[in-house]
Amino acid sequence: MLVPLVIIVVFSFGYRDELGKFVPGASFANYLRFINGPYLLCLWRSLSLSFSTTLFCLVLGFPVAMWMAFALPKERQNFFMVLLTIPLSISFLLRLYAWITILRPTGLATFLLQSVGVSNPPSLLYNQGAVLLGMVYNYLPYMILPLYAALEKLDRRFIEAGYDLGATPWRTFFQVVVPLSLRGIVAGVILVFIPSLGDYVTPDLLGGAKYMYIGSLIQNQYLSVRDWAFGSAVSTVLLIIVSAGVWFYIKYGERTTVSHS
């Protein structure tokens, strides 16, 4: 695992010569180029998309996880777990092309809008809304699974105690259920935020490559521009951000979840 990371870091200090070949070096020029150029907008756009994806997955995934853990008998929980993980066995690209078929102007979504009286339905494909929809669809199971694992182990007597002490359902949810399932929440956030931050396939296919994200920038530098030095510098910046998030979870997240437990 370390050797490829070391290679990327070493490449980030080099440069590309006039013939497009990589030349080793010891310069921070690629990092300065990233900071001073328009590329920070790509990073901000990716962070915003990842944050939105994580938030939507959490808001949608928590009720599903609670329903599976609290409302279903054990044998039906296992059945729905299988249903939840089946889409993960299908090709990532195939699922995205399925959404393209649904969202295109002649697709099912447009047909349904027209059938309910919308004469001129808006464009549903190749925009940021379609990108967010595809991201949430692809990463939602990674949020539900750790949430379900945390909620399934939750002692129901704590919830009953909250009701006995006069707490409303909402107060019991925020002051009992959420703190006791914090470990699952943090794990789900990391499992969704980190891969969505570097995703470039979903924005390219569902967004029509109209907007440049950090993953698209890295892919473009390696495969199109052939500037491996700058691509490595951008990859290193992304690696630092991800590592900082993981370090923060290890240092503070585990301590918080243990104290709540």
Image (cartoon, rainbow, N blue to C red):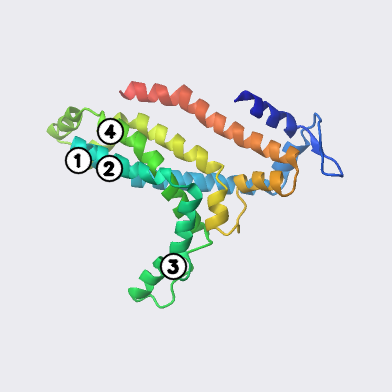
Q: Is residue 225 left or right of residue 87?
A: right
Q: Secondary structure at mark 1?
A: loop
The Cα atoms of the two marked residues, 3 and 2, are separated by 28 Å
Q: Which residue is mark 4?
A: 151
Q: Locate residue 176, reporting x and y percent.
A: 25, 32
Is there a contact, CB below 8 Å, between mark 4 and mark 1?
no
Mark 1 residue crowding within 10 angstroms, few (<14) / some (14–19) / many (20+) = few
Q: Which residue is mark 1?
A: 72
**Which label lies toward us, 4 or 1?**
1
- The disc at residue 107 is 3
Most foreground residue, 254 or 85: 85
Q: Is residue 49 left or right of residue 259?
A: right
Residue at 62 percent of width and 52 percent of height:
212
State which tag comes first along the sequence, 2 or 4. 2
Residue bearing the label numbered 2: 80
Q: Looking at the image, is mark 2 or mark 4 nearer the viewer?
A: 2
Secondary structure, mark 4, is helix
- Give whichever of discs 2 and 1 has the lower sequence position: 1
Viewport quadrant of the C terminus: top left
Coordinates of residue 66 in the picture (x, y in percent):
26, 40
Q: Amino acid at mark 4?
A: Leu
Task: Tell me residue 197's x, y (percent).
Answer: 54, 42
Q: Amino acid at mark 1?
A: Leu
